[in-house]
Amino acid sequence: MTDSVRKQEEKRQNYAALMEAIKARLDVVQFILNNGKTMPLNEDAAQELCWLQLRMIGETISAACLLAHDDLQNKRLQGEWNANNIIATLGNLHAEFFPRPVKREHLADGTIHMNSVPDGFLTRDELLKLIGQAGNKLHIGSLKNLFEKKPLPQDIWDEIRTWNNKIVLLLQEHFIKFRDNSVYYIALKEAIENNKVLFVLAAPQAVGL
């Protein structure tokens, strides 16, 4: 195995590991959304646990983008932890660095076509908004804010569910386009892989490029 092939395999495994971590956190959010009102847990605490998972998911997506585009990295970027800086820097280096969602369609002739997802998924700008908003939810704020009127619990659950659905739609099937126009297709739960992450090199035309 050449160094180049070994490096690509390591990147594939590491990216898949990050997606598995996101899946685990999405499962936590979905479980609380399904059972939060019947769990022996304070409702505020249950919602805060969801916000924590969403914040961690957002930061993991940022890290996954950095990992996927390791050819764009420099020493400063390798040590960067701030999602805003990572996303801004990658965007300047490669405009199409962010994951793009697709939906597989099995055609009658046995072939598979990848359809673009038009909307409803987490965008690059929304990723930064999510990280910031979720972070704010994990602080009690000032003494004055503690006694201000708060949103209704159901409105907060609806907000959490919306963010959760956006993340799922972005990542459940997506591809990453590299600066050299090579493309990798990723599925979070692939049946032939025992519902593990699938990460494969794809022909650009297969995802409509």
Image: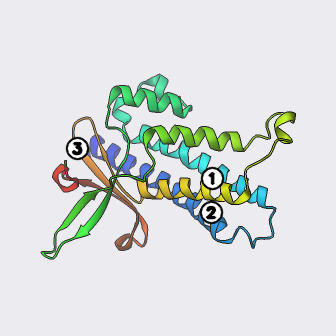
Residue at (58%, 59%) from the top-left corner? 161
Q: Earlier in the sequence, mark 2 or mark 3?
A: 2
Residue 16 coordinates in the image, percent (x, y): 43, 55
Q: Position of residue 13 (x, y in %)?
A: 41, 53
Horizontal arrangement in the rendering, residue 166 relative to residue 208 (left or right): right
- Left/right placement of residue 137 relative to residue 166 reads right
Instruction: Tell whether label 1 touches label 3 (CB within 8 Å).
Output: no
How did the renderer colour the structure? Answer: rainbow
Q: Secondary structure at mark 3?
A: loop
Separation of disc 1 and disc 2 at Cα? 8 Å
User: Residue 78: percent from the left, percent from the top?
Assistant: 48, 30
Can residue 70 be seen in this snapshot? yes
Q: CA distance from mark 2 to mark 3?
A: 34 Å
**Residue topped by disc 3:** 182
State the residue position of label 1: 53
Looking at the image, can residue 21 be seen? no
Q: Amino acid at mark 2?
A: Val
Residue count near mark 1 (Cα–Cα under 10 Å), binned few <14, some 14–19, many ≥20: many
Residue behind mark 2: 28
> In the image, what residue occupies the spot 81% across and 62% down?
42
Query: Which one is nearer the viewer's eye here, 51 or 200?
Result: 51
Q: Which one is in front in this view, the residue at disc 2 or the one at disc 3?
A: 2
Residues tagged 1 and 2 counted as in contact (Cβ below 8 A): yes
Q: How many residues crowd mark 3 within 10 Å: few (<14), some (14–19), many (20+)?
A: few
Q: Earlier in the sequence, mark 3 or mark 1?
A: 1
